[in-house]
């Protein structure tokens, strides 16, 4: 691909910053649009990993005029700017709708009402749009249930039951054509982002791609943001000599994928037209239990004495299992995960050993408890 003028919204964030590095490395001219949200960047300070070869505009995705100016001369857009926090979205509703849905509306409104030279628009979507994952009953086949009934959770009966025979069902990978059942405001706003981008992309013939990220981990994920990914939250607890807290029984599973593989998926989506106007799961295709995450981090850090605390409580809206079916992105874009879970965790720990980690987990948990969400 020839050199392009590229805008990365949220380009100082976890995924965005690595994407900026890769784009600069490949010879592209990159412009970053980021508000340096203090929940991610304390005191709105520029992170030490900020790429000096990229232009930086400090502005909010909700600022229509600033975004319009930033889009001048741009040929490719990676839209990563978003408020991120599943639990927090359940009580900071206006913020999440304004930033995620409203910010995307700003971007698209500018494109359709002004002249532009956009060749590709790639949006960060989310696996949370599916709600629960897929399950398979040996007798009655594939199932995609809704939330587990609260009376079941109160009995600490964690696994999903077949609606016919009532037996526990093992999880199965989730393909892209699975019905989306949003259970949180965050999930709804990420679904809005995806649907709006693909809708306007098709209507105005702007090649667009939605990448449904599963659980991303790796260096640069804030260790002081209690609403970020579970790996960073657990690492922050351990660095502060505190035990990781796990809801339910710790056997619930997620699909963890390295930030480096996420960046590779973005580059493939940019360079290959075969993925245009489609949504793709981006995950490893492997489920890992939350308890295993905590134990792995403790083992690498040498904090085995800080065993995870599993009190048997549950959080409203949490899914039991979520694993990506990545056959579509493999076939269409040639994507295959390259970073193993163990290597990725070792890289995270090595990066984070000397990083500041302010443990805000208790404060975040209190906010949920006060509202009856735990």
Image: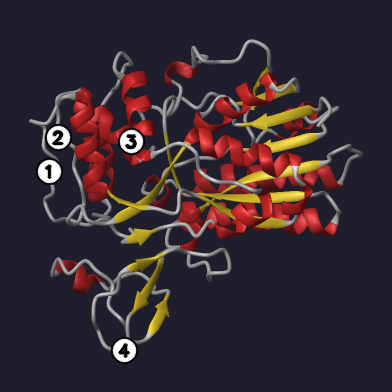
Quick one: SS at disc 4? Answer: loop
Task: Compute the Cα span from label 3 to label 1.
Answer: 22 Å
The local secondary structure at tag 1 comes to: loop
Work out which quarter of the rendered image holds the C terminus and state it: bottom left
Q: Quadrant of the N terminus?
A: top right
Specify whether 248 is left or right of 227.
left
Check disc 2 and report its element: helix, strand or loop.
Answer: loop
Q: Earlier in the sequence, mark 3 or mark 4?
A: 4
Pointer 3 local density, CA inside 10 Å: few below 14, some 14–19, many at least 20: few
Sequence order check: which comes first, mark 3 or mark 1? 1
- Separation (CA) of disc 2 from disc 4: 40 Å
The Cα atoms of the two marked residues, 1 and 4, are separated by 35 Å
197 w.r.t. 73: above or below: below
Name the N-terminal-most of marks 3 and 2.
2
Q: Please report the residue visible at 29 percent of the width from the left and 74 percent of the height from the top.
A: 169
The residue lying at 42 percent from left, 78 percent from top is 142
Cα separation between marks 1 and 2: 6 Å
Q: Are marks 1 and 2 in contact (CB under 8 Å)?
A: yes
Q: Residues under labels 3 and 2: Cα distance?
A: 21 Å
């Amino acid at each position: 691909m020839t050199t392009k003028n590229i805008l990365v919204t949220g380009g100082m964030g976890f995924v965005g910053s690595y994407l900026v590095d890769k784009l600069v490395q490949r010879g592209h001219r990159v412009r970053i649009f980021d508000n340096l949200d203090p929940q991610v960047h304390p005191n709105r300070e520029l992170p030490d990993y900020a790429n000096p070869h990229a232009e930086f505009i400090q502005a909010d995705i909700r600022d229509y005029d600033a975004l319009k100016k930033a889009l001048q001369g741009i040929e490719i857009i990676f839209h990563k700017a978003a408020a991120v926090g599943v639990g927090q979205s359940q009580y900071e509703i206006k913020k999440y709708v304004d930033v995620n849905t409203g910010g995307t509306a700003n971007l698209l409104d500018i494109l359709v009402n002004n002249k532009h030279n956009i060749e590709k628009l790639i949006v960060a979507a989310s696996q949370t749009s599916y709600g629960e994952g897929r399950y398979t009953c040996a007798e009655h086949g594939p199932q995609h249930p809704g939330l587990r009934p609260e009376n079941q959770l109160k009995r600490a009966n964690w696994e999903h039951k077949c609606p016919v025979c009532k037996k526990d069902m093992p999880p199965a990978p989730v393909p892209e054509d699975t019905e989306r059942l949003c259970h949180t405001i965050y999930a709804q706003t990420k679904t809005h982002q995806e649907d709006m981008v693909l809708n306007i992309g098709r209507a105005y013939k702007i090649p667009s791609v939605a990448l449904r990220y599963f659980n991303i981990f790796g260096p640069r994920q804030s260790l002081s943001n209690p609403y970020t990914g579970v790996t960073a939250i657990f690492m922050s607890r351990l660095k502060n000599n505190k035990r990781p807290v796990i809801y339910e029984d710790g056997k619930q599973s997620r699909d963890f994928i390295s930030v480096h593989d996420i960046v590779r998926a973005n580059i493939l989506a940019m360079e290959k037209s075969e993925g245009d106007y489609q949504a793709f799961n981006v995950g490893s295709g492997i489920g890992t239990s939350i308890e295993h995450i905590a134990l792995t981090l403790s083992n690498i850090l040498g904090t085995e004495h800080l065993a995870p605390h599993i009190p048997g409580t549950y959080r409203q809206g949490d899914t039991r299992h979520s694993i990506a079916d990545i056959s579509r992105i493999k076939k269409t874009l040639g994507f295959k995960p390259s970073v193993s879970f163990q290597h990725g965790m070792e890289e995270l720990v090595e990066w984070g050993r000397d990083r500041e980690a302010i443990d805000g987990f208790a404060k975040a948990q209190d906010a949920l408890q006060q509202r009856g969400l735990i």
